[in-house]
Amino acid sequence: MKKYAVSTYVYFIIPSLIGIFLFMTPVLTEEGWKVPIAILANVLATIVAPIISYFTIIMFAISAIGALMAKFIPRKNVKEPSILDTLFYVNWFWTITRCIGLVFASMVVFNFGPFAINNENTGGLLMDPNGGLVTFLFTIFLFAGFLLPFLTNFGLLEFFGTMMVRIMRPLFKSPGRSSIDALTSWVGDGTIGVLMTSKQYEMGNYTKKEAAIIATSFSVVSITFCIVVLDTVHLARYFIPYYLTVVFCGIVLAIIMPRIYPLAQKEDTYIDGTPVDYSREELPEGYNLVSHGLENALAVAHANRDPRKFIKDGSRNVIDLWIGVAPIVMAFGTVALMLAEFTSIFVILGKPFEPILTVLGLPEAAEAAQTMVVGFADMFLPSILGAGIESDTTRFVIAVVSVTQLIYMSEVGGLILGTKIPLKFFDLVVIFILRTLISLPIAALVGHLLF
């Protein structure tokens, strides 16, 4: 094993422990269990609430105007793109989407335009300065983006990735390093998981298929949100069996989904087009899992000793998320919420689930059917709509499925579309439906056993 200075061990251990604490260690607060990174974001969100909406508009304007201007200004260096190239040289679809996000946000903040856009259940829900998703994303992106190098730049992923590859690769078709990504998502927050997956993909550590698998299999909602969901459907006393069911469904889905369409059809190539390199995961002669993982970790820590690189990488993450991702979430999230609020599309789309729920022996199947699809717009809608159903069994199933569906356009879904992760809107629709169909019978079985 190659010898490294003691200081290199320090550069590996200390920042990695800080990263584990910030992103993966739940802390009990008045609002429930949260990871420190989310606590910091909540505190800042409260402080900047009076101005966050206007700051959001400024960032959206920079995003949209910059993308429009880039259409008429040729790139200086295509082979080595600058941060400005990365931020603004996007195709027309994403340029228009950014403009739509700006228009929607402006309508909400300055109170003009159609009621369908700027009311409190659609655009207003996303832009609420006191806890709206889009405004909160600006604070969570600030801390998560800037501090993410604690997890990614000092060898933690390489250390655990080497040891976990024999579990993650055969079970979930993903590299060992995704174990940290998965745990960060599960314990922390789905948005942090998507952020981390996107950055690892852009750095060439995940292939297109791996990034798609990880983003749609492990970026689950937090434990705190699970408690809120269960409380909304009046079943808070059943939290332990409920959460165990959610975990079991999540593991089953993470095993099945990478092996079927559309994830199985994704290219197993890195962002630059080179094919997957499994040799990265091979154990060299004379090494065991621990020694090989440690050497990989120390090599990364040694290469990232300069604090200026930490600041540069973290700052670039934040700007990229503020300008490249947040407007997309606003655009897609508002459209999805408008469809849920002002049309019958989710009632119509939910009709095919009625016979399925009936076959599974769930009471009030007709009332519950639309809750199976409305979660595509927002993760909380199924619980709100299902709260009035009398059957404990049916409400339990709704609560489980609404969390395990994972693809919510007002949060994770919109966020995925705003990143470079190679998933299209149609892919997310199919994944959402498949996750619903697979988790339904599991949730129904447990529900019948409980009630």
Image: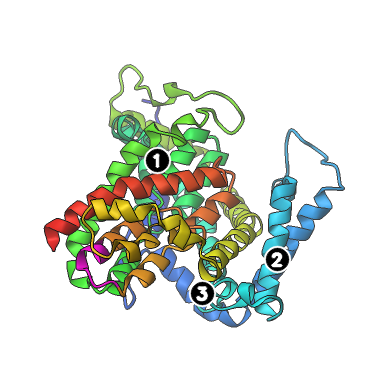
Judged left or right of residue 51, residue 383 is: left
Q: Position of residue 152 (x, y in %)?
A: 47, 45
Dot label at residue 102: 2
For the stretch drawn in magenta, the main secondary structure is helix
Residue at x 74%, y 33% (from the top left corner): 79
Dividing the picture into quadrants, the one containing residue 358 is bottom left
Q: Is residue 36 magenta?
A: no
Image height of 349 relative to 6, above or below: below
Q: In the picture shown, does residue 54 fall above or below 265?
A: below
Q: Secondary structure at mark 2?
A: helix
Query: Under tag 1, what secondary structure?
Result: helix
Circle nearer the N terminus (1, 2): 2
Sequence-wise, the earlier of marks 1 and 3 is: 3
Q: Secondary structure at mark 3?
A: helix
Query: Which of the 4 image quadrants contains residue 420?
Result: top right
Q: Residues within 10 Å of mark 1 (few under 14, many from 20)?
A: many
Amino acid type, mark 2: Leu
Residue assigned mark 1? 178
For marks 2 and 3, the one nearer the N-term is: 3
Q: Amino acid at mark 1?
A: Ser
Task: Give how far across and how far down residue 342 sits, in percent.
Answer: 55, 70
Q: Are marks 2 and 3 in contact (CB under 8 Å)?
A: no
Q: Quadrant of the N terminus?
A: top left
Disc number placed over residue 44 in the picture, else none: 3
Residue in the image at 12% along x and 56% along y = 449
Q: Which residues are magenta?
A: 389-396
Dot label at residue 32:
none
